[in-house]
Image: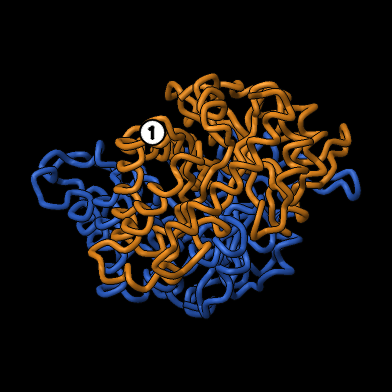
Chain colours: A orange, B blue
Protein backbone atom coordinates (compact mmCIF):
# COMPACT_ATOMS: atom_id res chain seq x y z
CA UNK A 1 0.00 0.00 0.00
CA UNK A 2 1.40 3.43 -0.88
CA UNK A 3 1.00 6.71 1.01
CA UNK A 4 -1.85 8.01 -1.13
CA UNK A 5 -3.82 4.77 -0.78
CA UNK A 6 -3.38 4.87 2.97
CA UNK A 7 -4.62 8.47 3.09
CA UNK A 8 -7.64 7.51 0.97
CA UNK A 9 -8.53 4.77 3.44
CA UNK A 10 -8.24 7.29 6.27
CA UNK A 11 -10.59 9.66 4.44
CA UNK A 12 -13.03 6.89 3.60
CA UNK A 13 -13.22 5.51 7.12
CA UNK A 14 -12.84 8.95 8.74
CA UNK A 15 -10.34 7.32 11.06
CA UNK A 16 -6.60 7.03 11.60
CA UNK A 17 -6.97 4.30 14.17
CA UNK A 18 -4.60 1.36 14.36
CA UNK A 19 -5.78 -1.47 16.58
CA UNK A 20 -2.99 -3.24 18.40
CA UNK A 21 -3.58 -6.98 18.37
CA UNK A 22 -1.59 -7.58 21.57
CA UNK A 23 -3.40 -10.81 22.20
CA UNK A 24 -2.36 -12.26 25.55
CA UNK A 25 -3.50 -15.83 26.07
CA UNK A 26 -3.80 -15.01 29.78
CA UNK A 27 -6.24 -12.16 29.16
CA UNK A 28 -8.65 -13.42 26.53
CA UNK A 29 -12.18 -14.44 27.56
CA UNK A 30 -12.42 -17.84 29.22
CA UNK A 31 -14.99 -19.25 26.82
CA UNK A 32 -12.51 -18.97 23.92
CA UNK A 33 -9.98 -21.25 25.60
CA UNK A 34 -12.05 -24.26 24.48
CA UNK A 35 -11.64 -23.44 20.78
CA UNK A 36 -8.90 -25.14 18.76
CA UNK A 37 -6.96 -21.87 18.37
CA UNK A 38 -8.00 -19.39 21.07
CA UNK A 39 -5.68 -16.55 19.98
CA UNK A 40 -6.92 -16.69 16.41
CA UNK A 41 -10.56 -17.04 17.52
CA UNK A 42 -10.15 -13.92 19.63
CA UNK A 43 -8.43 -11.97 16.85
CA UNK A 44 -11.01 -12.96 14.26
CA UNK A 45 -13.86 -11.65 16.38
CA UNK A 46 -11.96 -8.47 17.27
CA UNK A 47 -11.14 -7.87 13.60
CA UNK A 48 -14.69 -8.39 12.38
CA UNK A 49 -15.97 -6.11 15.14
CA UNK A 50 -13.52 -3.27 14.55
CA UNK A 51 -12.66 -3.37 10.82
CA UNK A 52 -15.09 -0.63 9.84
CA UNK A 53 -13.47 1.81 12.27
CA UNK A 54 -9.80 1.08 11.75
CA UNK A 55 -7.30 1.55 8.93
CA UNK A 56 -4.57 -0.63 10.40
CA UNK A 57 -3.89 -3.61 12.64
CA UNK A 58 -0.66 -4.02 14.55
CA UNK A 59 0.05 -7.38 16.14
CA UNK A 60 2.97 -7.16 18.56
CA UNK A 61 4.95 -10.32 17.93
CA UNK A 62 5.96 -10.82 21.56
CA UNK A 63 2.44 -11.94 22.40
CA UNK A 64 2.54 -14.67 19.75
CA UNK A 65 6.15 -15.72 20.27
CA UNK A 66 5.42 -16.23 23.96
CA UNK A 67 3.28 -19.19 22.82
CA UNK A 68 6.02 -20.74 20.67
CA UNK A 69 5.30 -22.15 17.23
CA UNK A 70 1.58 -22.49 18.04
CA UNK A 71 1.45 -18.73 18.60
CA UNK A 72 3.18 -18.10 15.29
CA UNK A 73 0.53 -20.23 13.56
CA UNK A 74 -2.20 -18.12 15.22
CA UNK A 75 -0.46 -14.99 13.98
CA UNK A 76 -0.03 -16.26 10.42
CA UNK A 77 -3.73 -17.13 10.33
CA UNK A 78 -4.58 -13.67 11.64
CA UNK A 79 -2.57 -11.88 8.97
CA UNK A 80 -4.03 -14.07 6.22
CA UNK A 81 -7.52 -13.45 7.54
CA UNK A 82 -7.14 -9.68 7.45
CA UNK A 83 -5.52 -9.69 4.01
CA UNK A 84 -8.19 -11.90 2.45
CA UNK A 85 -11.26 -10.32 4.07
CA UNK A 86 -10.10 -6.70 4.46
CA UNK A 87 -7.41 -6.19 1.80
CA UNK A 88 -7.37 -2.41 2.27
CA UNK A 89 -6.38 -2.57 5.90
CA UNK A 90 -2.70 -1.89 6.56
CA UNK A 91 -0.93 -4.52 8.68
CA UNK A 92 2.09 -3.73 10.80
CA UNK A 93 4.37 -6.37 12.30
CA UNK A 94 5.36 -4.75 15.57
CA UNK A 95 8.60 -6.67 15.79
CA UNK A 96 11.23 -4.01 16.54
CA UNK A 97 13.78 -5.99 14.55
CA UNK A 98 17.19 -4.88 13.29
CA UNK A 99 20.37 -6.85 12.66
CA UNK A 100 23.43 -6.79 10.39
CA UNK A 101 22.48 -6.41 6.72
CA UNK A 102 22.80 -10.09 5.85
CA UNK A 103 20.37 -10.95 8.65
CA UNK A 104 17.97 -8.03 8.22
CA UNK A 105 17.53 -9.32 4.67
CA UNK A 106 16.11 -12.50 6.14
CA UNK A 107 13.77 -10.65 8.48
CA UNK A 108 12.55 -8.66 5.49
CA UNK A 109 12.00 -11.90 3.60
CA UNK A 110 10.01 -13.23 6.59
CA UNK A 111 7.71 -10.23 6.92
CA UNK A 112 7.31 -9.11 3.31
CA UNK A 113 8.09 -12.25 1.30
CA UNK A 114 6.67 -15.19 3.16
CA UNK A 115 4.06 -13.18 5.06
CA UNK A 116 2.03 -10.28 3.74
CA UNK A 117 2.61 -7.49 6.20
CA UNK A 118 2.62 -3.93 4.87
CA UNK A 119 5.12 -2.66 7.42
CA UNK A 120 7.49 -3.71 10.16
CA UNK A 121 8.81 -1.74 13.12
CA UNK A 122 12.62 -1.58 13.22
CA UNK A 123 15.06 -0.46 15.94
CA UNK A 124 17.70 2.05 14.76
CA UNK A 125 20.68 1.25 17.00
CA UNK A 126 22.57 -0.81 14.38
CA UNK A 127 22.25 1.85 11.66
CA UNK A 128 21.81 1.92 7.93
CA UNK A 129 22.57 -1.63 6.82
CA UNK A 130 20.22 -2.99 9.48
CA UNK A 131 17.33 -0.87 8.19
CA UNK A 132 17.67 -0.66 4.41
CA UNK A 133 16.94 -4.31 3.55
CA UNK A 134 13.35 -3.69 4.67
CA UNK A 135 13.05 -0.91 2.08
CA UNK A 136 13.70 -3.05 -0.97
CA UNK A 137 10.13 -4.35 -1.27
CA UNK A 138 7.76 -2.13 -3.30
CA UNK A 139 4.94 -0.51 -1.32
CA UNK A 140 6.25 -1.99 1.92
CA UNK A 141 7.31 0.16 4.86
CA UNK A 142 9.86 0.45 7.60
CA UNK A 143 8.54 2.07 10.76
CA UNK A 144 11.66 3.18 12.59
CA UNK A 145 11.71 3.72 16.35
CA UNK A 146 12.43 7.40 16.96
CA UNK A 147 10.95 8.55 20.28
CA UNK A 148 9.26 5.73 22.14
CA UNK A 149 6.38 5.93 24.60
CA UNK A 150 8.05 4.27 27.58
CA UNK A 151 9.99 5.66 30.54
CA UNK A 152 13.20 4.05 29.21
CA UNK A 153 13.08 6.49 26.26
CA UNK A 154 14.81 8.97 28.58
CA UNK A 155 17.87 6.73 29.01
CA UNK A 156 19.39 7.26 25.55
CA UNK A 157 16.97 8.94 23.12
CA UNK A 158 17.47 12.42 24.59
CA UNK A 159 21.27 12.34 24.68
CA UNK A 160 22.57 15.51 23.01
CA UNK A 161 25.23 15.30 20.34
CA UNK A 162 28.38 17.24 21.16
CA UNK A 163 28.82 18.26 17.52
CA UNK A 164 25.45 19.81 16.77
CA UNK A 165 23.32 19.70 19.92
CA UNK A 166 20.85 17.31 18.34
CA UNK A 167 19.13 14.81 20.57
CA UNK A 168 19.62 11.18 19.57
CA UNK A 169 16.01 10.76 18.39
CA UNK A 170 16.43 13.86 16.22
CA UNK A 171 19.59 12.41 14.69
CA UNK A 172 17.72 9.16 14.02
CA UNK A 173 14.99 11.14 12.23
CA UNK A 174 17.48 13.18 10.18
CA UNK A 175 19.99 10.46 9.32
CA UNK A 176 17.37 7.89 8.34
CA UNK A 177 15.82 10.25 5.83
CA UNK A 178 18.88 9.59 3.67
CA UNK A 179 17.98 5.90 3.65
CA UNK A 180 14.34 6.07 2.57
CA UNK A 181 11.52 8.33 1.52
CA UNK A 182 8.08 9.30 2.75
CA UNK A 183 6.87 6.39 0.59
CA UNK A 184 8.70 3.64 2.47
CA UNK A 185 9.61 5.07 5.85
CA UNK A 186 7.48 5.99 8.87
CA UNK A 187 8.50 6.67 12.47
CA UNK A 188 7.34 5.57 15.90
CA UNK A 189 6.66 8.54 18.18
CA UNK A 190 4.98 7.81 21.51
CA UNK A 191 1.79 9.67 22.40
CA UNK A 192 3.24 10.17 25.87
CA UNK A 193 5.77 12.51 24.24
CA UNK A 194 3.10 14.41 22.26
CA UNK A 195 4.55 17.79 23.23
CA UNK A 196 7.56 16.86 21.09
CA UNK A 197 5.44 16.24 17.99
CA UNK A 198 5.66 19.88 16.84
CA UNK A 199 9.47 19.74 16.77
CA UNK A 200 9.35 16.34 15.14
CA UNK A 201 7.01 17.66 12.42
CA UNK A 202 9.64 20.28 11.59
CA UNK A 203 12.12 17.49 10.86
CA UNK A 204 9.69 15.10 9.13
CA UNK A 205 6.78 17.19 7.82
CA UNK A 206 5.55 14.64 5.31
CA UNK A 207 6.24 11.24 6.82
CA UNK A 208 3.60 9.13 8.50
CA UNK A 209 4.06 8.60 12.23
CA UNK A 210 2.87 5.56 14.14
CA UNK A 211 1.81 6.80 17.56
CA UNK A 212 1.35 4.27 20.35
CA UNK A 213 0.63 5.14 23.96
CA UNK A 214 -2.88 6.60 23.75
CA UNK A 215 -5.15 4.96 26.32
CA UNK A 216 -3.53 2.56 28.80
CA UNK A 217 -0.19 4.39 28.61
CA UNK A 218 -1.80 7.81 29.17
CA UNK A 219 -1.24 9.77 25.93
CA UNK A 220 -3.81 12.29 24.64
CA UNK A 221 -5.38 11.84 21.20
CA UNK A 222 -6.27 15.54 20.99
CA UNK A 223 -2.71 16.65 21.66
CA UNK A 224 -1.31 14.09 19.23
CA UNK A 225 -3.65 15.28 16.48
CA UNK A 226 -3.12 18.99 17.10
CA UNK A 227 0.66 18.63 16.99
CA UNK A 228 1.02 15.80 14.52
CA UNK A 229 -1.55 15.96 11.69
CA UNK A 230 -0.18 16.93 8.29
CA UNK A 231 -1.73 17.46 4.86
CA UNK A 232 -2.20 13.69 4.32
CA UNK A 233 -3.13 13.04 7.93
CA UNK A 234 0.31 11.54 8.52
CA UNK A 235 -0.74 9.75 11.70
CA UNK A 236 -1.65 6.22 12.65
CA UNK A 237 -2.67 6.29 16.30
CA UNK A 238 -2.55 2.92 17.97
CA UNK A 239 -4.76 1.67 20.75
CA UNK A 240 -4.38 -1.88 22.04
CA UNK A 241 -5.58 -2.67 25.53
CA UNK A 242 -8.28 0.03 25.54
CA UNK A 243 -10.01 -1.67 22.63
CA UNK A 244 -9.27 -5.37 22.62
CA UNK A 245 -9.74 -5.77 26.37
CA UNK A 246 -12.71 -3.40 26.68
CA UNK A 247 -14.48 -6.43 28.16
CA UNK A 248 -13.18 -9.85 29.17
CA UNK A 249 -16.63 -11.41 29.01
CA UNK A 250 -18.65 -13.05 26.22
CA UNK A 251 -19.53 -9.57 24.93
CA UNK A 252 -15.86 -8.71 24.34
CA UNK A 253 -16.27 -8.17 20.59
CA UNK A 254 -19.26 -5.85 21.03
CA UNK A 255 -17.40 -3.87 23.65
CA UNK A 256 -14.30 -3.69 21.42
CA UNK A 257 -16.51 -2.43 18.61
CA UNK A 258 -17.99 0.26 20.85
CA UNK A 259 -14.53 1.30 22.03
CA UNK A 260 -13.17 1.46 18.46
CA UNK A 261 -16.22 3.41 17.31
CA UNK A 262 -15.75 5.94 20.10
CA UNK A 263 -12.14 6.57 19.07
CA UNK A 264 -13.13 6.74 15.40
CA UNK A 265 -15.75 9.39 16.20
CA UNK A 266 -13.17 11.50 18.04
CA UNK A 267 -10.84 11.09 15.07
CA UNK A 268 -13.56 12.12 12.62
CA UNK A 269 -13.96 15.41 14.49
CA UNK A 270 -10.22 15.99 14.49
CA UNK A 271 -9.91 15.19 10.76
CA UNK A 272 -12.78 17.55 9.97
CA UNK A 273 -11.27 20.34 12.07
CA UNK A 274 -8.07 19.93 10.08
CA UNK A 275 -10.01 20.04 6.78
CA UNK A 276 -8.79 16.58 5.85
CA UNK A 277 -12.28 15.16 5.20
CA UNK B 1 24.11 -21.22 33.95
CA UNK B 2 26.08 -18.78 36.10
CA UNK B 3 29.36 -17.03 35.30
CA UNK B 4 31.56 -19.49 37.20
CA UNK B 5 29.93 -22.49 35.50
CA UNK B 6 30.46 -20.90 32.11
CA UNK B 7 34.13 -20.27 32.91
CA UNK B 8 34.51 -23.90 34.03
CA UNK B 9 33.12 -25.11 30.70
CA UNK B 10 35.59 -22.84 28.91
CA UNK B 11 38.47 -24.29 30.93
CA UNK B 12 37.27 -27.86 30.43
CA UNK B 13 36.86 -27.54 26.67
CA UNK B 14 39.82 -25.15 26.30
CA UNK B 15 37.59 -23.08 24.07
CA UNK B 16 35.51 -19.92 24.16
CA UNK B 17 33.88 -20.64 20.84
CA UNK B 18 30.22 -19.94 20.17
CA UNK B 19 28.87 -21.51 17.00
CA UNK B 20 26.26 -19.38 15.26
CA UNK B 21 23.44 -21.59 14.01
CA UNK B 22 22.49 -19.21 11.20
CA UNK B 23 20.84 -21.97 9.26
CA UNK B 24 19.69 -20.69 5.89
CA UNK B 25 17.40 -23.10 4.08
CA UNK B 26 18.91 -21.82 0.83
CA UNK B 27 22.44 -22.78 1.85
CA UNK B 28 22.17 -26.18 3.47
CA UNK B 29 23.33 -29.26 1.54
CA UNK B 30 20.90 -30.48 -1.11
CA UNK B 31 20.63 -34.01 0.22
CA UNK B 32 19.05 -32.74 3.46
CA UNK B 33 16.15 -31.14 1.64
CA UNK B 34 14.51 -34.56 1.37
CA UNK B 35 14.32 -35.01 5.14
CA UNK B 36 11.11 -34.10 6.99
CA UNK B 37 12.76 -31.13 8.73
CA UNK B 38 15.85 -30.03 6.79
CA UNK B 39 16.82 -27.16 9.12
CA UNK B 40 16.71 -29.38 12.19
CA UNK B 41 18.51 -32.24 10.38
CA UNK B 42 21.28 -29.81 9.47
CA UNK B 43 21.51 -28.37 12.98
CA UNK B 44 21.55 -31.80 14.62
CA UNK B 45 24.51 -32.90 12.53
CA UNK B 46 26.35 -29.62 13.04
CA UNK B 47 25.77 -29.79 16.79
CA UNK B 48 26.95 -33.39 17.13
CA UNK B 49 30.02 -32.56 15.04
CA UNK B 50 31.02 -29.41 16.93
CA UNK B 51 29.80 -29.91 20.53
CA UNK B 52 33.18 -31.02 21.85
CA UNK B 53 34.82 -27.80 20.65
CA UNK B 54 32.22 -25.22 21.57
CA UNK B 55 30.81 -23.80 24.80
CA UNK B 56 27.82 -22.03 23.24
CA UNK B 57 25.39 -22.13 20.35
CA UNK B 58 23.72 -19.02 19.03
CA UNK B 59 20.83 -19.44 16.61
CA UNK B 60 19.93 -16.14 14.97
CA UNK B 61 16.15 -16.09 14.92
CA UNK B 62 15.86 -14.36 11.56
CA UNK B 63 16.89 -17.53 9.78
CA UNK B 64 14.09 -19.52 11.42
CA UNK B 65 11.44 -16.81 11.26
CA UNK B 66 12.04 -16.49 7.53
CA UNK B 67 10.48 -19.98 7.28
CA UNK B 68 7.39 -19.06 9.29
CA UNK B 69 5.95 -21.38 11.94
CA UNK B 70 7.74 -24.39 10.40
CA UNK B 71 11.05 -22.62 11.02
CA UNK B 72 10.08 -21.93 14.62
CA UNK B 73 9.38 -25.64 15.09
CA UNK B 74 12.85 -26.45 13.70
CA UNK B 75 14.34 -23.98 16.15
CA UNK B 76 12.42 -25.31 19.15
CA UNK B 77 13.60 -28.81 18.30
CA UNK B 78 17.17 -27.56 18.00
CA UNK B 79 17.14 -25.90 21.43
CA UNK B 80 15.56 -28.98 23.02
CA UNK B 81 18.13 -31.21 21.36
CA UNK B 82 21.06 -29.20 22.70
CA UNK B 83 19.60 -28.95 26.19
CA UNK B 84 18.86 -32.67 26.46
CA UNK B 85 22.06 -34.00 24.90
CA UNK B 86 24.56 -31.29 25.87
CA UNK B 87 23.10 -29.64 29.00
CA UNK B 88 26.33 -27.76 29.76
CA UNK B 89 26.34 -25.85 26.50
CA UNK B 90 25.12 -22.27 26.77
CA UNK B 91 22.38 -21.32 24.30
CA UNK B 92 21.87 -17.77 23.10
CA UNK B 93 18.74 -16.59 21.29
CA UNK B 94 20.17 -14.00 18.93
CA UNK B 95 16.92 -12.10 18.70
CA UNK B 96 17.90 -8.45 19.32
CA UNK B 97 14.57 -7.84 21.02
CA UNK B 98 13.50 -4.90 23.17
CA UNK B 99 10.09 -3.31 23.70
CA UNK B 100 8.14 -1.44 26.39
CA UNK B 101 8.29 -3.20 29.77
CA UNK B 102 4.89 -4.87 29.47
CA UNK B 103 5.94 -6.42 26.16
CA UNK B 104 9.56 -7.25 27.04
CA UNK B 105 8.05 -9.32 29.87
CA UNK B 106 6.40 -11.47 27.23
CA UNK B 107 9.58 -11.86 25.20
CA UNK B 108 11.35 -12.92 28.41
CA UNK B 109 8.59 -15.43 29.05
CA UNK B 110 9.04 -16.75 25.50
CA UNK B 111 12.80 -17.24 25.71
CA UNK B 112 13.29 -18.19 29.36
CA UNK B 113 9.92 -19.59 30.40
CA UNK B 114 8.53 -21.50 27.47
CA UNK B 115 11.89 -22.19 25.85
CA UNK B 116 15.13 -22.99 27.63
CA UNK B 117 17.61 -20.48 26.31
CA UNK B 118 20.34 -19.27 28.67
CA UNK B 119 20.56 -15.81 27.14
CA UNK B 120 18.94 -13.43 24.68
CA UNK B 121 20.44 -10.53 22.77
CA UNK B 122 18.62 -7.24 23.42
CA UNK B 123 18.77 -3.84 21.68
CA UNK B 124 19.28 -0.87 24.04
CA UNK B 125 17.46 1.96 22.25
CA UNK B 126 14.30 1.78 24.38
CA UNK B 127 16.19 1.88 27.68
CA UNK B 128 15.82 0.37 31.12
CA UNK B 129 12.25 -0.95 31.17
CA UNK B 130 12.82 -2.69 27.84
CA UNK B 131 15.86 -4.57 29.19
CA UNK B 132 15.18 -5.36 32.85
CA UNK B 133 12.35 -7.89 32.36
CA UNK B 134 14.92 -10.26 30.86
CA UNK B 135 16.94 -10.08 34.09
CA UNK B 136 14.27 -11.45 36.39
CA UNK B 137 14.97 -15.10 35.61
CA UNK B 138 17.69 -16.73 37.78
CA UNK B 139 20.86 -17.74 35.92
CA UNK B 140 19.53 -16.28 32.67
CA UNK B 141 21.31 -13.52 30.81
CA UNK B 142 20.73 -10.39 28.78
CA UNK B 143 23.35 -9.77 26.11
CA UNK B 144 22.98 -6.09 25.33
CA UNK B 145 24.09 -4.62 22.00
CA UNK B 146 26.89 -2.17 22.72
CA UNK B 147 29.21 -1.84 19.72
CA UNK B 148 28.07 -3.95 16.79
CA UNK B 149 30.19 -5.50 14.05
CA UNK B 150 28.48 -3.92 11.05
CA UNK B 151 29.14 -0.74 9.09
CA UNK B 152 25.91 0.81 10.40
CA UNK B 153 27.46 0.87 13.87
CA UNK B 154 29.05 4.18 12.81
CA UNK B 155 25.68 5.86 12.27
CA UNK B 156 24.70 6.27 15.92
CA UNK B 157 26.92 4.24 18.27
CA UNK B 158 29.84 6.71 18.09
CA UNK B 159 27.82 9.88 18.67
CA UNK B 160 29.49 11.86 21.44
CA UNK B 161 27.45 13.14 24.35
CA UNK B 162 27.59 16.91 24.77
CA UNK B 163 27.56 16.60 28.56
CA UNK B 164 30.45 14.26 29.13
CA UNK B 165 32.03 13.43 25.77
CA UNK B 166 31.05 9.77 26.06
CA UNK B 167 30.25 7.89 22.89
CA UNK B 168 26.78 6.36 22.77
CA UNK B 169 28.08 2.79 23.08
CA UNK B 170 30.07 3.85 26.15
CA UNK B 171 26.95 5.35 27.70
CA UNK B 172 25.07 2.13 26.97
CA UNK B 173 27.82 0.18 28.76
CA UNK B 174 27.86 2.52 31.76
CA UNK B 175 24.14 3.12 32.16
CA UNK B 176 23.17 -0.53 31.79
CA UNK B 177 25.50 -1.55 34.60
CA UNK B 178 22.98 0.03 36.96
CA UNK B 179 20.34 -2.40 35.65
CA UNK B 180 22.18 -5.70 36.05
CA UNK B 181 25.35 -7.36 37.23
CA UNK B 182 28.16 -9.42 35.77
CA UNK B 183 25.96 -12.42 36.67
CA UNK B 184 23.07 -11.53 34.37
CA UNK B 185 24.40 -9.06 31.83
CA UNK B 186 26.83 -9.47 28.93
CA UNK B 187 27.51 -7.19 25.96
CA UNK B 188 27.82 -7.59 22.20
CA UNK B 189 31.06 -6.09 20.89
CA UNK B 190 31.91 -6.78 17.27
CA UNK B 191 35.27 -8.33 16.44
CA UNK B 192 35.57 -5.81 13.62
CA UNK B 193 35.93 -3.14 16.34
CA UNK B 194 38.54 -5.15 18.28
CA UNK B 195 40.79 -2.11 18.69
CA UNK B 196 38.08 -0.68 20.96
CA UNK B 197 38.10 -3.69 23.27
CA UNK B 198 40.80 -2.24 25.53
CA UNK B 199 38.71 0.86 26.23
CA UNK B 200 35.63 -1.28 26.66
CA UNK B 201 37.44 -3.48 29.18
CA UNK B 202 38.12 -0.38 31.26
CA UNK B 203 34.38 0.21 31.50
CA UNK B 204 33.32 -3.43 31.93
CA UNK B 205 36.34 -5.33 33.29
CA UNK B 206 34.40 -8.31 34.59
CA UNK B 207 31.47 -8.79 32.23
CA UNK B 208 31.39 -11.42 29.55
CA UNK B 209 31.39 -10.10 25.99
CA UNK B 210 29.81 -11.86 23.04
CA UNK B 211 32.01 -11.12 20.04
CA UNK B 212 30.63 -11.77 16.57
CA UNK B 213 32.38 -10.83 13.37
CA UNK B 214 35.38 -13.17 13.37
CA UNK B 215 35.67 -14.98 10.03
CA UNK B 216 33.26 -13.94 7.28
CA UNK B 217 33.01 -10.39 8.65
CA UNK B 218 36.79 -10.01 8.90
CA UNK B 219 37.58 -9.69 12.63
CA UNK B 220 40.79 -11.12 14.13
CA UNK B 221 40.60 -13.72 16.91
CA UNK B 222 44.12 -12.84 18.11
CA UNK B 223 43.33 -9.17 18.49
CA UNK B 224 40.02 -9.90 20.21
CA UNK B 225 41.75 -12.19 22.71
CA UNK B 226 44.66 -9.88 23.40
CA UNK B 227 42.40 -6.93 24.07
CA UNK B 228 39.41 -8.68 25.57
CA UNK B 229 40.34 -11.63 27.78
CA UNK B 230 39.83 -11.12 31.53
CA UNK B 231 40.45 -13.27 34.60
CA UNK B 232 37.45 -15.51 33.83
CA UNK B 233 38.04 -15.46 30.08
CA UNK B 234 35.11 -13.08 29.68
CA UNK B 235 34.75 -13.76 25.97
CA UNK B 236 32.44 -15.82 23.81
CA UNK B 237 33.67 -15.48 20.25
CA UNK B 238 31.10 -16.39 17.66
CA UNK B 239 31.70 -17.92 14.28
CA UNK B 240 28.79 -18.82 12.04
CA UNK B 241 29.38 -19.07 8.32
CA UNK B 242 33.03 -20.10 8.67
CA UNK B 243 31.99 -23.23 10.54
CA UNK B 244 28.51 -24.29 9.51
CA UNK B 245 29.10 -23.70 5.81
CA UNK B 246 32.67 -25.01 5.73
CA UNK B 247 31.31 -27.38 3.08
CA UNK B 248 27.98 -27.52 1.29
CA UNK B 249 28.42 -31.16 0.35
CA UNK B 250 27.60 -34.46 2.06
CA UNK B 251 30.73 -34.04 4.19
CA UNK B 252 29.43 -30.76 5.67
CA UNK B 253 29.43 -32.04 9.26
CA UNK B 254 32.99 -33.36 9.05
CA UNK B 255 34.16 -30.08 7.57
CA UNK B 256 32.31 -28.11 10.25
CA UNK B 257 33.99 -30.28 12.85
CA UNK B 258 37.41 -29.59 11.36
CA UNK B 259 36.70 -25.85 11.19
CA UNK B 260 35.48 -25.76 14.82
CA UNK B 261 38.48 -27.80 15.96
CA UNK B 262 40.86 -25.39 14.24
CA UNK B 263 39.32 -22.41 16.05
CA UNK B 264 39.33 -24.32 19.35
CA UNK B 265 43.04 -25.05 18.94
CA UNK B 266 43.79 -21.38 18.36
CA UNK B 267 41.72 -20.52 21.42
CA UNK B 268 43.55 -23.10 23.54
CA UNK B 269 46.85 -21.38 22.76
CA UNK B 270 45.38 -17.98 23.61
CA UNK B 271 43.89 -19.26 26.90
CA UNK B 272 47.20 -20.84 27.86
CA UNK B 273 49.12 -17.65 27.05
CA UNK B 274 46.75 -15.78 29.35
CA UNK B 275 47.25 -18.38 32.11
CA UNK B 276 43.56 -19.23 32.11
CA UNK B 277 44.09 -22.97 31.65
Q: Residue at x 17, y 41 (%)?
A: B29
Residue A23 pos. (x, y %) = 44, 59
Looking at the image, residue A76 lies above or below residue A88: below
Residue A72 visible in the displayed image: yes
Q: Which residue is disc 1 drawn over?
A: A112
Residue A144 visible in the displayed image: no
B99 or B9, which lies in front?
B99
Q: Is residue A219 left or right of residue A264?
A: right
Q: Residue at x 60, y 67 (%)?
A: B185
Picture quadrant of residue B28: top left
B115 or B204, which lies in front?
B115
State which chain disc 1 sits on.
A
Picture quadrant of residue A64: bottom left
Q: Is residue A86 left or right of residue A141?
A: left
A128 or A170, which lies in front?
A170
Q: Is residue B232 left or right of residue B5?
A: right
Residue B115 pos. (x, y %) = 37, 69
How many neighbours does mark 1 have within 10 angstroms: few (below 14), some (14-19), or many (20 or more)? Answer: many
Residue A144 pos. (x, y %) = 60, 38
Looking at the image, residue A184 lies above or below residue B227: above
Amino acid sequence: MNQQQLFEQIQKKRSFLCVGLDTDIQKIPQHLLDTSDPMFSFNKEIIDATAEFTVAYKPNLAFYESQGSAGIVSLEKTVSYVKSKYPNIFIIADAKRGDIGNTSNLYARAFFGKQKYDAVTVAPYMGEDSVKPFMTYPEKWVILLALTSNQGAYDFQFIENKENGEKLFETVLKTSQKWGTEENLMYVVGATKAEKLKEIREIVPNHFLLVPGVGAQGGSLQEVAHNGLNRKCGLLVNSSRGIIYASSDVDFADQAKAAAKKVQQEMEVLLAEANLI
